[in-house]
Amino acid sequence: MKVNLHPRTGLLFNAYLLMFFIHKVQTGVGIVGLPRIVYLDSKHDAWISVFLAGVITGIVIWAMFIMLKQYDSADLYGIQVDMFGKWLGNLLNIIYMVYLSACFFAIFMNYIEIVQVWIFPNLPTWQLSLVLIALSVYAVQGGVRVVVGLAFLAVLGTLWLAAVLIVPMKYADSTHLFPILNVDIKHLIKGMYGSSLSMMGFELLMFFYPFIKDKKNTLLYAQIGNLYTTILFSIVTLVSIMFFAEDSLARTIWPVLSMFKIVRLPNLERFEFIAVSFWMLIIVPNMSAYLWAASKGFSRVINLKQKHGIWFIGILGWALAFFVHTRSQMNAVTDYVAKMGFVLAFCYPVMLSALVFMKKRFMRRKADNAQGS
Amino acid sequence: MFKWRSDRKQAEEHKSHSLDVDELKKQLEEELASCSDISFRTIKKDGKKILTSFLSSLIDKSSLDEFILQSLQTNFSKSMTVEEVAQILPIAQLSASNQLKEIVESIIEGSVYIYVEGEPCGLLANVSKTAERSLEKAETEALVYGPKISFTESLPINVNILRSNVKDAKLCFEDIEVSTRVKARIKIVYIKDIADPNNVETFRQRISNLKVDYIPDTTVLGQLIENNSWSVFPQLMTTELPDRISIGLLSGKVAVLMDRSPAALYGPTPFFTFFESTEDIYMRWNMAFFLRMLRLSAIFLSVLLTPAYVSVLTYHYEVIPSPLLVSLGQSRANVPFPPVFEALLLEFIIEMLREAGARLPTKVGQTMGIVGGIVIGQAAVDAGFTSNILIIIIALSALGSFTTPSYLMGTAIRIIRFPIIILAGFWGGIGIMVAFCFFLIHLLKLDSLGRPYLSPAYPLRLSDLGYSMFRYPLEYLSKRPVTNQPVDNDRFPVKKAKQKKDVDE
């Protein structure tokens, strides 16, 4: 396997699109339940936890960039083989492929659960999952440009949803926030860990990196995307804390949707129906980004065609959906993906980038020495 | 064996005709499949024969009589050669040939073949006369403002119009050979130092690679050379407005003209081009901006209103505030159908009316208005077929789809409404979003001549937004649209346009 990918120029996309892409892949189903999950640990300082988690994400992105910069045009699949050799490297690659496919699965399953709870209680899971998977397969078949373009247009199309938060602000009570920083460090960190699931998605940078046209701007735009996500998440958490009474936030599973519920226009009520439907525009780009990255492994690791990989993962995901029936099972799946993600998206890349950095440093010194003598 | 056969075929293609007049007559008659309108006229002088052969339906009789026969009769002498005959004929387009195939092809195009017995070759004189109509106002693309002239079926006239519109020495008309059974005269038009050579090459390559028997019109040519023929969205645009082509050429687009086709094909034409009218350019920018926004939102409403009605009334009636719900319920109280069926029925009736109106002769066309007024009116409501509100919604969405300047795109938009309505009937809002996501992905995957279809929205080209989605004041449009990848970017110097004067200077 070639470590560096060097795709042809027609496939490359501009770095500024990362700004939208990173934001889009981070904002998925996670944000709908984020305020509650963080609130359970860090109480009324949850928004600080979310913000700090965003800062840490920024640091991880920086570490990733340091790692990717050491190569011309390599993705994580190539780097791991370069670092750990064929066998261990490919084993790690397959773990990543499983993780990415699991994310793909978790995203659409969570969305279907939301749809079933909020709109159609009797809608069979397999129908909606079939349609969602078909949509993302269709998108991924268009290649990396379509996946990134979909994320870009979806961000533009869903920007206005953030503005809807102004309505619950009218009923907000700012005293819920005080006293600020009253929660001890341990709970704050627990809250940060809780928000890691929602922050995930930025690790796709390691797979899309070879397809960026102006690679030197990668870090800047990825950070802007992450910054927007961080601010948005913090504000959403902040508003939820102010809007809900202490106990009700802990008992509301999807606080963001519950807040949408109170939006009332002269010709429109129960805004959450529209919001939940519209959420599909957030979900589909997310699914296709993960599906793309996972199926890319098929051509990178196993020497199969990527299009076969797309179908394989799609059908597998659809089949697996039959085994998840209850809310508790779904919770278990999501927790499991979150745990995997915490290791594979946050911890491991930092470690790997340190290793890559040291290795390249070492090689350079060796080369210099060889030249000197 | 096969080599020998191919050799013979080649020999057949380059066969010179017989040098004997009577034999030649026979050969020509045979090659032209014994048409009844092939005519021969033999002039005899001093024992030497001159044969003129032509298709009487294709040539201009008076110029044949006046310029060919008369000059031959008065000036002919015994020792005359082909060169001398060429000297005495007062005709501009004259060529010598003795290849049977070439001669037959020219005769089909309206030439006269003049052959002096005993000479090695004869002369082809072009005196063709084609049926053509005079220049008229554009009909399918109606305009309030700006030039009204439209293309006709004649290629020379169309070239003439374009040449006089764009008086630029770099304006290129490039002939393209198509390997069709019926020879089509196709010209690629572009301005050499503006248009991207890649676009020209794409057109050239795709057209010359075609292998079909007949291309009736540029719209067919467009379908033949676009990338995704399964899509409902047209990827190349045809227009009958010469000024539209001129503006396109100057912004770096490439056009294709075809003989016997009253419309020019041009590209690259991304999605939003289909919502541009030339009037947007002739109008003041703020009006044009408003009209464009109006058009885009009309399209959006046209696609979304009926499905929204269906999904809300079938599944999400909680969304409607109670006062409105009461009136909706009352209007629907008499309707026995589910909302999907009701909406599909009414949409279908509207489509039928539109199609019937388009097919009817103008004299009976008024009937359509009356029928439509009665059917899609109070009668349908009184009969308990539909609700009042749905009629308003359907009328709005029909209106919205007619605001599209391109008839093709308008039809595409009306068609995509049907699957969306059905999906809305299945899954309500979720169904609408499924359709919306599908079309978004679909549009992202399309391309026009290899250029992204959703440009300038994706890839985002901020400077092009002023051309296609919005309309900026002219002074900000100093660069040609990047979407066309023009070679020469500048329309006018920016500095001069942006010079600002101080107060009372």
Image (tube, coloured by chain):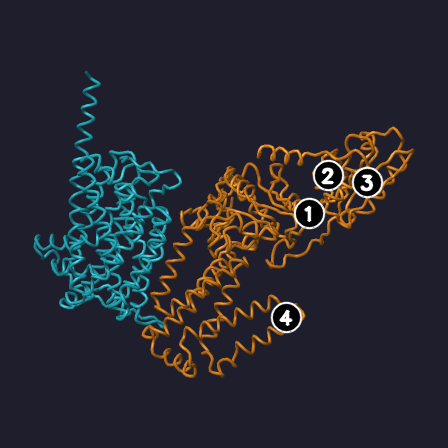
**Residues under labels 1 and 4: Cα distance?**
32 Å
The residue carrying pointer 2 sits among few (fewer than 14), some (14 to 19) or many (20 or more) residues within 10 Å by Cα, namely many
The answer to whether residue A115 shows anywhere in this view is: yes
Q: Quadrant of the C terminus of chain A?
A: top left
Q: Mark 2 points at which residue?
A: B103
Quarter of the picture holding the N terminus of chain A: top left
| Cα separation between marks 2 and 3 | 12 Å
Residue position marked by numbered label 3 in the rendering: B52
Q: In this view, does B416 lie above or below B54?
A: below
Front residue (pair B499, A47) = A47
Question: How far is disc 4 from disc 3 in space, using C-alphas?
Answer: 51 Å
Q: Which mark is residue B157?
A: 1
In the rendering, at what x and y percent does residue A105 appear?
Answer: 24, 56
Q: What secondary structure is marked by label 4?
A: helix
Write the residue at 56% across / 76% down.
B373
B280, A333: nearer the viewer:
A333
| Residue at mark 3: chain | B
**Residues tagged by mark 2 and mark 4 found on one chain of the structure:** yes
Determine crowd level at label 1: few under 14, some 14-19, many 20+ residues with C-alpha closer than 10 A. some
Element at label 3: strand
Q: How far apart are marks 2 and 4 (CA)?
A: 49 Å
Are tags 4 and 3 found on a single chain?
A: yes
Disc 1 marks a residue whose amino acid type is: Ile
